[in-house]
Image: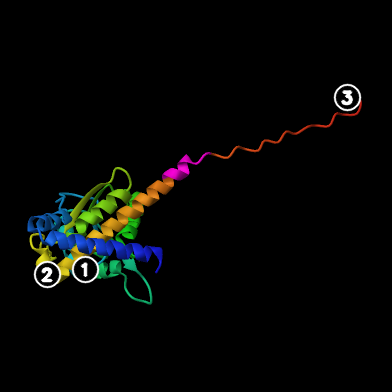
Amino acid sequence: MAPMSRLRLALAILAALGLGLLLSVRPAARALGRGLVRDDRPVSADVIVVLGGDVRRRAPHAAALWKEGLAPRVLAVGGTVEQGRLSEARKTARVLAEAGVPAEVVTVLGQDEPSTQAEAAAIAIACAEQGWIEVAVVTSPYHTWRAGQILEHSLPEGTRLSMVPSPLDPFNAEGWWQDPMQRRRVRNEVGKYLLWRLLARADAEEQASRKMEPMKPLALTRTYSAPRPGGAA
């Protein structure tokens, strides 16, 4: 098994054990459920971003926000394009069109964004290129906190981020442990967050060590000119 696969397995086991302990203490389980949901309730933005996944619950809410005038543009991200299949971003664009959002206000990415980290990197580039400062991101409620952490780590300095949980998603922060699907989603969120933090910390430490490496002394070569005939020695 590859080192990364072993790390993912270990984190999955730790997340499962941790959730098992939490479930024995219901107040702590409720606190975890509430903590996963971040709702910034923006009143205006430069762009509404729809993260990939669960398109039928995320995209319609983004369309409703656009119709309410939250932002003039919508950005669809997520997924990869392979074997002729639609990426998550293109599925999002299709649902937005069905909901009445004009194609000319929708920007579609999703060429190579198979993870939240890859989505955040693509959004950061789009913000820098388009000059977007206020960004409202629509995703599933249980995904808002982790996605917000990753986005704040990735977006250009000065960007004002607002996370918007879609109310069309049935996630129950007060009783998620009662549903097997919601238990799995919470476990995945915790495990993926731990993995991201570990990798981000390792990357930061590696960059810091590179900066502290002493520079090698330059090899200086002296050049001598041969004396001209009859000149001074």
Q: Measure the alpha-carbon separation of dots 2 and 3.
A: 97 Å
**Residue 197 at least partly seen:** yes
Q: Which mark is residue 54?
A: 1
Helix, strand or loop at disc 1? loop
Q: Residues within 10 Å of mark 2 (few under 14, many from 20)?
A: few
Question: What residue range appears in magenta?
Answer: 208-214
Helix, strand or loop at disc 3? loop
Residue carrying label 2: 179
Q: Measure the alpha-carbon separation of dots 1 and 3.
A: 87 Å
Q: Measure the alpha-carbon separation of dots 1 and 2.
A: 18 Å
Q: Residues within 10 Å of mark 3 (few under 14, many from 20)?
A: few
Q: Earlier in the sequence, mark 1 or mark 2?
A: 1
| Residue 57 image offset from top left, x and y in percent | 17, 67
Q: Amino acid at mark 2?
A: Asp
Q: Amino acid at mark 3?
A: Gly
Q: Amino acid at mark 1?
A: Asp
- Give left or right: position of 102 versus 208: left
Helix, strand or loop at disc 2? loop
- Give left or right: position of 30 versus 195: left
Residue carrying label 3: 231
Query: Residue, x 8% and y 63% (percent of image)?
Result: 175
| Residue 113 image offset from top left, x and y in percent | 34, 63
Query: Residue, x 26% and y 67% (percent of image)?
Result: 93
Q: Which quadrant of the rendered structure holds the N terminus?
A: bottom left
Closer mark to the observer between disc 1 and disc 2: 2
Question: What is the chief secondary structure element of the magenta stretch?
Answer: helix
Query: Which residue occupies the foreground of this view, 15 or 35?
Result: 15
Can you tell which quarter of the image residue 222 is in? top right
Residue 126 drawn in magenta:
no
